[in-house]
Image (spheres, rainbow, N blue to C red):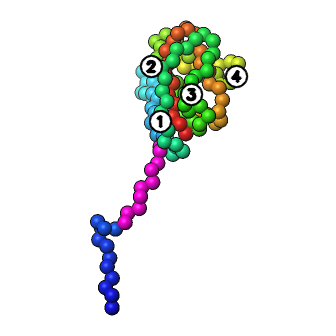
Amino acid sequence: MDEIHVPDEETRIRPQSTVVHRLTIVSTVYHQVHGGEAQDLQTRCSRVLTTDEQLYQRLMKSTEKPSPIDLGWLKGLPIGLIHIDNRDKQAELLVYFGASEALIKIPPLESFFFTPAKEFSVQVSSNIGGSKFMVSIIPG
């Protein structure tokens, strides 16, 4: 009768790990009224991305007229997240989504992120031309 050999832990074939490209968001907003305790609003979420494409990031200057943000090499690809960070200490950024009037206002030194449902034109303007902002785009 033939002997049955059971491989030990070191010689067993291990399944290859599945590479997952992931987007994770952790955000906390605090609200406090005078004399009261701060209340926090927390966001924690994570989702799998369909690509291993690199993050696209550009420092841009706004104008008083809406101008499209540059999607770089990600134009036409699925977008996982767009983050607009207002780097100016005085200017408010206004964000347009293919509309004639601004839908989002980003106060000085604040930011906004979103995931578009489909490809469209995102435009930015500011009340003070030449304001700096950072656009970061994570492919989807």
**How far from the left and from the top, in percent, is residue 81?**
54, 34
Is label 2 in a helix, a strand or a loop?
Answer: loop
Decide: few, some or many residues near mark 2? Use Cα within 10 Å; few <14, some 14-19, many ≥20.
few
Q: How far apart are marks 1 and 3 (CA)?
A: 12 Å
What is the magenta segment's predominant secondary structure? loop
Instruction: Report the residue at 70% width, 22% height from top.
Output: 99
Q: Which residue corresponds to mark 3? A: 71
Badge nearest the viewer, 3 or 4: 3
The x, y position of residue 127, in whole percent, is: 58, 10
Q: Between disc 2 and disc 1, whose residue precedes?
A: 2
Q: Is residue 28 magenta?
A: no
Helix, strand or loop for disc 3: loop
Q: Which of marks 3 and 4 is nearer the N terminus?
A: 3
Camera-side mark, 2 or 4: 4
Question: Which label belongs to residue 99?
Answer: 4
What amino acid type should be assigned to the residue bearing mark 4?
Ala
Q: Where is residue 104 in the image (x, y as percent from the top left)?
A: 60, 22
Q: How far apart are marks 3 and 4 (CA)?
A: 18 Å
SS assignment at label 1? loop
Q: Nearer the viewer, residue 119 or 74?
A: 74
- Residue for badge 2: 34
The amino acid marked with disc number 3 is Leu
Q: Residue 54 carries which label?
A: 1
Crowd rating for badge 3 (residues with CA inside 10 Å; few <14, some 14–19, many 20+): some
